[in-house]
Amino acid sequence: MTDQELLAYTQAWSLAAFQRPFRHQIYFNRRLKTTGGRYHLSDHHIDINPLMLEEFDLANLKRVVLHELCHYHLHLTGRGYQHRDQDFKQLLAAVGGARYAPRTSQRRRVQAQQRYCYQCQACGIRYWRKRRVNLARYRCGRCRGRLILKKIEKTSR
Ligand SMILES: [Zn+2]
Ligand SMILES: [Zn+2]
């Protein structure tokens, strides 16, 4: 699908779901890795992760575009356009937009490169783990002290 076709779909979906025109630009942006799309407050354009179509289908692309259009229309009409706002939650549910973008192969790759650093609050020893640890269950192997998550780090390729 070209950017031009994406724009035509978006204009049609905007009118059908919001009864308002989409008057700005929308592009596929391959640099988006962990998100489905992004609405830009500065110039009102929308970026869409092309994997939303390539690894899924048109119905999924539509749900992701509807999500970004909720940000777009709420922002332009001066209402709560952020995820935590009631306006956003209600409008998203009303138009059937995606709450979360589905997990892509790229996102799995990004997650596979993460490491979590835990530190014992009692003795200070650090542990590196590839997976998240349930801090309610796991204690320090040396002194049984409580662990805290120190940082999440992306390992180099
Ligand atoms: Zn969003
Ligand atoms: Zn310890």
Image (cartoon, grey):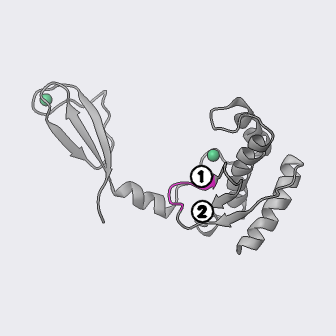
Q: Residues within 10 Å of mark 1 (few under 14, many from 20)?
A: some
- Residue lying at 88% horizontally and 50% vertically, measured from the top left: 20
Disc 1 target residue: 101
Residue 3 spot, x, y in % from top left: 71, 71
Q: Which residue is mark 2?
A: 49
Residue 47, position in %: x, y? 64, 60
Q: Nearer the viewer, mark 2 or mark 1?
A: 2
Of callouts 2 and 1, the N-terminal one? 2
Residue placed most toward the observer, 43 or 95: 43
Of residues 59 and 118, the one nearer the viewer is 118
Task: Tell me residue 145's x, y (percent).
Answer: 17, 25
Residue ranking furthest to the bottom = 2
Instruction: Locate residue 140, reporting x and y percent.
Output: 17, 31
Q: Where on the picture, by quarter, is residue 59?
A: bottom right
Q: Give the quarter of the figure containing the N terminus.
A: bottom right
- Residue at 77% across / 37% down in the picture? 78
Residue type (three-letter) at the residue carrying disc 2: Asn
The reply to whether discs 2 and 1 touch (Cβ–Cβ < 8 Å) is: yes
Magenta region: 32-38
Q: Residue at x 71, y 30 (%)?
A: 86
